[in-house]
Image: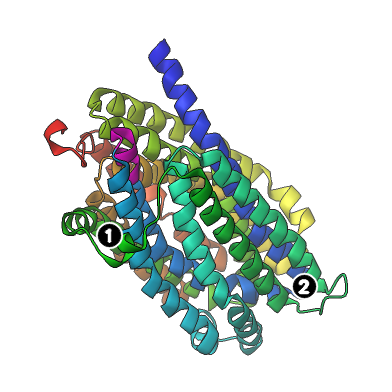
Amino acid sequence: MDQKKGFAGKLIKIILPITIQNFMFSLVPISDAMMLVYLDQDQMSAVSLAAQAMFVLNIFLYAIVSGMSLFAAQYWGKGDIRSFEKMVGYSLKLSFPILLVFFGLGMFNPMGVMRIYTNDPVIIAHGMKYLRFVAFAYIFTGLAQIFGNVLKNSGLVIWSTVISVAMVISNVLLNAVFIYGLLGAPKLESRGAALATTISSAIGCISALILILVKKTIKIRIKDILKTDLDMRKDFSKYSGPLLFNNISWGIGFTMISVIIGHLNSDVVAANAIAAVVKDLVSCFCFALAAGGSIVVGNELGAGDLKHGKEYGDKIFKISIISGIILGLLTAASTPVVLRIVGLTPKAEYYLMWMLIMCSYYILGRSINSVVISGILAAGGDTKFGMICDTVTMWAFIVPVGALLAFVVKIPVVWVCFFLYLDEMVKIPVVYWYYKRYRWVKNIVNKEDA
């Protein structure tokens, strides 16, 4: 009974703040979409597509931050603070060049970025304005993710949530100010959404860094950024290499789905923008369960308690199934409410209705796969399976067949979307089979315990 209470306490202590944090972050695109759609549906669509650049950036950042986190969780469980600090320094070193590249693309080649996603000249023009203003946010957001992950893995997850809430509140308020030109500010419309994002991300980055310096759970040293521990780099590459490849492969594939939808018609783009926001909002708990599960399981494995690590993984897996079913049904049930709130064209509302209904199965798959692949397996350093599974699903099935159905066979748009929403469901049987082999139950920071 005590062990059960210990598990529940650990999980709730981590998952609840992360759920709140994820929920608050999901409110940002909702704020952008709702404020812009009342001005112009094309501006809302443009910002939705332009935001795909941030999505691609997050592909790289996720690999770095997740790699850092899987080691940090085990280092923290082992009590090895110095190795934790070195890992943070190495993660920062890897991030800087990537952040500068995306800053350059947004600032100096926004047209090239927008042309990847659409050929509509009006949407491209609005998207270019957004990208130039949001370019600085790429740097602040990347650093904020690393600093926030340090807080989560060093027992300061509550503070990470407080910072996230502050970021979101400031973003929403600044959205209103700059999009509509309130309080004497200029009316910037889509550019206002970008400026609000940049300012709020700077607030989050600076606040997290100050908190790390004040709390002193770990130290961020310049020498750890400039000089790399070769053994650590080797271990990081071994486990994070597959994460990076997986995220690039899956992320580009997911972007290709946006490209397919973006070249159908503007009503589908608008409907998909709203559906994506709803999916991410409902998935807050799924992602929090994956992140929290990775930390809880990783702490046990890093401490050498493989038995409890395995038991915790089994319990979290069961929770992912139950929560996926509930959240999927809630998403479908929310359809009338969402349609009443948004101000889309009748055709866009028709597409959105079916997309939200399709979320009933999409969310179930997302819950199970994110918790198992990104949470439990990653906690034990098992990152290769996710790379193979996601790559094969996306590139051998969803993207080529989806493009074929949309542009060659030219089936109705709703059926194209139905197929594109299957990417999570088709993985479940093999994910379950692999999970039950328990290859992920191992200690990667103290191998004699494995």
Q: Which residue is mark 1?
A: 392
Answer few, some or many: residues within 10 Å of disc 2's Cα (few below 14, many 20 plus, some between 14 and 19). Answer: many
| Dot placed on the residue nearer the N-terminal end, 2 or 1 | 2
Image coordinates for residue 216, horizontal then vertical, percent: 46, 45
- Where is residue 249 shown, x and y percent of the image? 32, 65
Depth check: give the residue in front, 345 or 110.
110
Residue 87 is at least partly visible in this image: yes
Q: Please provide percent x and percent y for residue 114.
A: 53, 83
Seen in the picture, residue 197 relative to 307 is either above or below; the reply is below
Left or right placement of residue 42 versus residue 19 in this view: right
Q: How many marks?
A: 2
What stretch of residues is rendered in magenta? 72-79
The rendered magenta stretch, by its main secondary structure, is classed as: helix
Q: Quadrant of the N terminus?
A: top left
Whether residue 367 is in magenta: the answer is no
Question: What residue would you read off at disc 2?
Answer: 179
Q: Nearer the viewer, residue 106 or 342?
A: 106
Q: Secondary structure at mark 1?
A: helix
Residue 101, position in %: x, y? 42, 79
Residue farthest left in this picture: 448
**What residue type is disc 1 on?**
Val
Residue occupying the point 79% across, 54% down: 340
Instruction: Specify the amino acid type for callout 2.
Output: Ile
Contact, mark 2 vs mark 1 (Cβ under 8 Å): no
Please identify the quadrant where the C terminus is shown.
top left
